[in-house]
């Protein structure tokens, strides 16, 4: 309600008060009683009122116990698995240290402004994504529904990754680790190494055959993988128990789920620095390649990473901020969380490349040993003359530097015959240039590196526990982005909705724990989020800046925060961010069009990956994921534009006044030109156009605008009609 207005209640014996004039005449004789009365909307008290400081009315919406708890929840949501296994890959692929510059620029242009926008609308309106965009523009209310759909799609496969991490975590309490060596196969005559493992590697074999037991194509279901099914069930049970009470339960867990990954990353970094070759990995990582930075693809991938790293468009940011006090400095929060996210990505990159540098040195030493033995064989066979080998070199214990010297000599002397010798150059850079991301980094490259760690089971337990915590932190925000808007809109019990949501997600998620499930994870990751989320955030930007009004929004922020935000945000929101987002959308569509839709399948008899195109039904599923995610936007727009459904849940409603109660009735949601984000006094906004009779018989009630903040207040209505009367008298 507007400031200084009172909540009033009164039992009147009059059936109907015909007009404002009649109402005022009735109240003159009982002004004191009227001042202490209370308005009831829909027969019950409005729970989520605009509570000002000093008000006796409490806001019953849940709230964070502390600012630290809220910041940790936002950090846990934004810092996820992508910081550990995608950012390092993009950094290595797109110019090393030079990649950080375009990333930082786009973080300032797209990331922080849009993150600040979502935080501010959620905090002021105090609703989930559906309620927020209904308030700002009812015709664009589909934005909130689209966010919920995308959140659900992402939650379906994201929790599968947590299930994978739980499986590896459970298998890490062994010495040696089960993926340390290739398994042996026995037959009637002798024992030999598993051929599929021998052709690939122990960690690769364990991932594809032991963990996933993967099929050779997406069309071969192969039935359920019971081990991963149990892990998926455990993952959903954890999420459900953590979220069942909303922020009252998840808010306590974020202290562990958000902070523990930093403890592990710092421990890994210290341990990795003590390993041989870690500096080689970090040097390779941060050696800038400026020429790559000029390629448009680098900027497109950096923008996409910024976009997903902060969780824009999911609704989780809005949901978390909706539990804040209205005077919270969300601008500070936006900058703080964004830079914590960035520095977490850099920290994870240091850890990843320090470990990969160690792994590259281990593999390089094996390479030198194997090729030294080959050179000794060639010397015995006479293929190579002993005279060309320097006398100071010990072939039986050759160092890397000595091997490179011998390799160069042999290459020059045996110029024509050299290719037939099949000697490897054994360069560390070649191993480091083998870019890996996603599951390949976490479950193959990193696990292989940890097998060479002293006390490898301990580090494996820590690593996969960290992945579980990173995943859970993101899942809390994702589920909150689904549950909060639905609870706010449809007033269902959060506990029941959370259980139903998780149970249904587990049942649908069974497609991801088939033997072909990994291919469906790839499909959902590629098609269910990228384009829909871009469209959602573009529409969010348009709704605030061009539908609601950027000038009005800046005024709302000034009143809410107590200071005027920098004009930098004004220009970012109005001009730069929309253009950048549209460019990113077009570039993503073009990239999808140029890239053949398909997936990397593991071929058992070849013991290697092979790119396969999706079958016709697979293409249909890909298209359906994109269409279903963005479908709510046009559907809601058409329904509300042409009034196809009588919307009784809107905040603009006609009012009847009878027996001291204001009853809300459905009306047309169009034409609301008041400030819905911040309540202003009557002098700050144009007076609504009322009919002759505001309070009429229940048989027919005219359209009536509410107070600017979407609430109902007799003081506000009367102040508009009689502006000369002091508000205290109203």
Image (cartoon, rainbow, N blue to C red):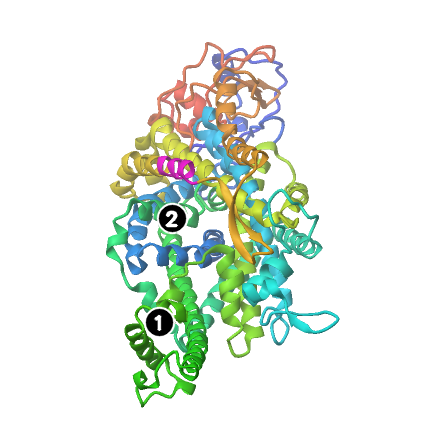
Please tell me whether mark 1 or mark 2 is closer to you in this view. 1
Q: Magenta residues, as a range?
A: 586-595
Asked if residue 262 is positioned above or below residue 16 in the image, the reply reads: below
Near-viewer residue (163 or 54): 163
Q: Is residue 90 visible?
A: yes
Label 2 Cα neighbours within 10 Å, binned few <14 / some 14-19 / many ≥20: many
Query: Is residue 323 rendered to the left or right of residue 541?
Result: right
Near-viewer residue (133 or 455): 455
**Residue 210 image offset from top left, x and y in percent:** 64, 61
- Tell me which label, 1 or 2, sits earlier in the chain: 1
**Quadrant in which residue 15 is drawn:** top right
**Residue 559 image offset from top left, x and y in percent:** 35, 39
Q: Which mark is residue 118?
A: none
**Quadrant in which residue 18 is drawn:** top right
Q: Main secondary structure of the magenta part?
A: helix
As drawn, the residue found furthest toward the right would be 188
Near-viewer residue (439 or 56): 439
Alpha carbons under labels 1 and 2: distance apart: 28 Å
Image quadrant in which the C terminus is located: top left
Magenta stretch containing residue 589, yes or no?
Answer: yes
Where is mark 1, residue-wise? 280
Label 1 Cα neighbours within 10 Å, binned few <14 / some 14-19 / many ≥20: many
Q: Which mark is residue 306?
A: 2
Residue at 57 percent across and 41 percent down: it is 152
Asked if residue 179 is positioned above or below residue 76 in the image, the reply reads: below
Asked if residue 507 is positioned above or below residue 410 in the image, the reply reads: above
């Amino acid at each position: 309600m507007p400031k200084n207005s009172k909540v009033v209640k009164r039992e009147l014996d009059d059936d109907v008060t015909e007009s404002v004039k009649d109402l005022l005449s009735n109240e003159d004789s009982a002004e004191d009683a009227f001042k202490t009365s209370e308005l009831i909307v829909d027969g019950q008290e409005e729970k989520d009122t605009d509570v000002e400081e000093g008000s006796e009315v409490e806001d019953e919406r849940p709230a964070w116990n502390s600012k630290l708890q809220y910041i940790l929840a936002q950090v846990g949501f934004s810092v996820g698995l992508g910081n550990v296994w995608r950012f390092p890959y993009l950094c290595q692929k797109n110019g090393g240290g030079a990649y950080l510059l375009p990333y930082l620029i786009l973080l300032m242009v797209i990331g922080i402004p849009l993150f600040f926008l979502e935080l501010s609308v959620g905090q002021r309106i105090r609703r989930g994504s559906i309620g927020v965009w209904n308030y700002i523009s009812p015709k664009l209310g589909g934005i909130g529904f689209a966010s919920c759909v995308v959140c659900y799609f992402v939650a379906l496969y994201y929790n599968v990754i947590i299930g994978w991490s739980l499986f590896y975590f459970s298998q890490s309490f062994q010495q040696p680790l089960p993926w340390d060596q290739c398994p042996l196969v026995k037959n009637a005559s002798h024992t030999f190494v598993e051929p599929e493992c021998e052709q690939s590697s122990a960690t690769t074999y364990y991932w594809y055959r032991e963990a996933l037991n993967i099929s050779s194509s997406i069309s071969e279901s192969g039935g359920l993988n019971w081990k991963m099914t149990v892990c998926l069930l455990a993952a959903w049970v954890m999420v459900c128990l953590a979220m069942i009470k909303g922020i009252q339960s998840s808010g306590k867990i974020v202290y562990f789920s958000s902070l523990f990954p930093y403890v592990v990353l710092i421990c890994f970094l210290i341990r990795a620095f003590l390993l041989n070759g870690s500096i080689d990995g970090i040097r390779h990582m941060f050696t800038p390649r400026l020429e790559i930075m000029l390629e448009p693809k680098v900027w497109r991938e950096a923008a996409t990473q910024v976009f997903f790293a902060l969780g824009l468009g999911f609704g989780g940011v809005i949901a978390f901020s909706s539990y804040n006090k209205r005077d919270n400095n969300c601008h500070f929060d936006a900058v703080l969380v964004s830079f914590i996210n960035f520095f977490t990505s850099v920290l994870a990159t240091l850890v990843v490349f320090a470990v990969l540098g160690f792994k590259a040195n281990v593999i390089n030493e094996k390479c030198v040993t194997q090729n030294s033995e080959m050179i000794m064989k060639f010397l015995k066979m006479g293929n190579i003359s002993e005279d060309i080998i320097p006398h100071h070199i010990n072939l039986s214990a050759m160092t890397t530097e000595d091997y490179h010297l011998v390799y160069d000599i042999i290459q020059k002397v045996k110029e024509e015959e050299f290719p037939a010798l099949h000697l490897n150059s054994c360069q560390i850079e070649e191993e480091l240039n083998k870019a890996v991301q996603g599951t390949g980094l976490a479950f193959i490259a990193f696990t292989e590196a940890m097998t060479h760690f002293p006390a490898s089971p301990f580090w494996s337990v820590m690593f996969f526990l960290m992945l579980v915590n990173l995943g859970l932190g993101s899942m809390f925000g994702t589920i909150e982005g689904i549950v909060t808007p639905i609870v706010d809109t449809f007033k269902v019990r959060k506990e029941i909705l959370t259980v139903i949501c998780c149970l249904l997600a587990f049942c649908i998620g069974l497609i991801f724990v088939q033997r072909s499930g990994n291919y469906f994870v790839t499909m959902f990751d590629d098609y269910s989020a990228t384009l829909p989320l871009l469209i959602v955030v573009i529409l969010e930007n348009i709704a605030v800046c061009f539908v609601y009004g950027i000038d009005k929004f800046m005024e709302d922020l000034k009143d809410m925060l107590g200071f005027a935000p920098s004009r930098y945000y004004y220009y970012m929101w109005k001009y730069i961010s929309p253009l950048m987002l549209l460019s990113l959308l077009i570039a993503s569509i073009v990239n999808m069009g140029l890239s053949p839709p398909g997936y990397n399948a593991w071929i058992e008899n070849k013991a290697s990956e092979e790119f396969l195109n999706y079958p016709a039904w697979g293409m249909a599923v890909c298209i359906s994921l994109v269409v279903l995610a963005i479908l709510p936007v046009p559907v809601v727009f058409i329904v509300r534009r042409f009034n196809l459904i009588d919307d009784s849940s809107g905040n603009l409603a006609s009012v009847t006044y009878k027996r001291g109660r204001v009853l809300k009735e459905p009306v047309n949601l169009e034409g609301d030109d008041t400030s819905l984000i911040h309540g202003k006094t009557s002098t700050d906004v144009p007076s609504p156009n009322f009919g002759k009779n505001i309070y009429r018989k229940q048989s027919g009630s005219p359209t009536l605008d509410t107070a600017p903040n979407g609430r109902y207040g007799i003081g506000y209505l009367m102040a508009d009609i009689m502006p000369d009367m002091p508000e205290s008298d109203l």
